[in-house]
Amino acid sequence: MGGAATNFEMLVTARACQGAFAALLSPSCLALLATTFTDPKERAKAFGVFSGVVASGSGGA
């Protein structure tokens, strides 16, 4: 929606919605990782990869 914004208000609203839904999605991803990977070594690797992806995504903002 942000790419198709025709005015500033629409852009700000799209970015606010994007942030709100990201805040809702993050705990769900962590819960999915915790239930999917039962072996502690695999779980640690999965959380490490997840953390790397999250850190690289927030670094560009």
Image (cartoon, helix red, strand yellow):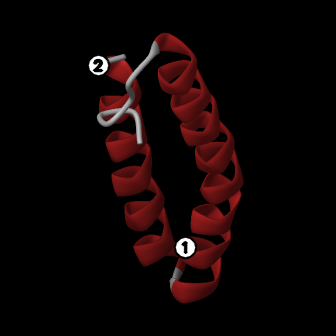
Residue 15 location (% of width, % of height): 53, 29
Nearest the viewer among 25 and 44 is: 25
Q: Earlier in the sequence, mark 1 or mark 2?
A: 1
User: Is the residue 51 above or below the residue 25 in the image?
Assistant: above
Nearest the viewer among 25 and 16 is: 16
User: Is the residue 33 above or below the residue 5 in the image?
Assistant: below
**Circles 1 and 2: CB distance less than 8 Å?**
no
Residue 38 visible in rendering: no
Q: Residues within 10 Å of mark 1 (few under 14, many from 20)?
A: some
Q: Which SS class for mark 2?
A: loop
What's the amino acid at mark 1? Leu
Comparing labels 1 and 2, the label whose residue is closer to the camera = 2
| Total marks placed | 2
Residue 25 visible in rendering: yes
Q: Which residue is mark 1?
A: 33
The residues tagged by marks 1 and 2 sit, at their Cα atoms, a distance apart of 24 Å
| Residue 51 position by quadrant | top left
Nearest the viewer among 28 and 5 is: 5
What's the amino acid at mark 2? Gly
Residue at 41% x, 76% y: name it.
Answer: 42
Residue 7 location (% of width, % of height): 44, 17
Residue 21 location (% of width, % of height): 63, 49
Q: Residues within 10 Å of mark 2 (few under 14, many from 20)?
A: few
Residue 54 location (% of width, % of height): 42, 40
Residue 60, disc: 2
User: Is the residue 16 above or below the residue 49 in the image?
Assistant: above
| Residue 2 position by quadrant | top left
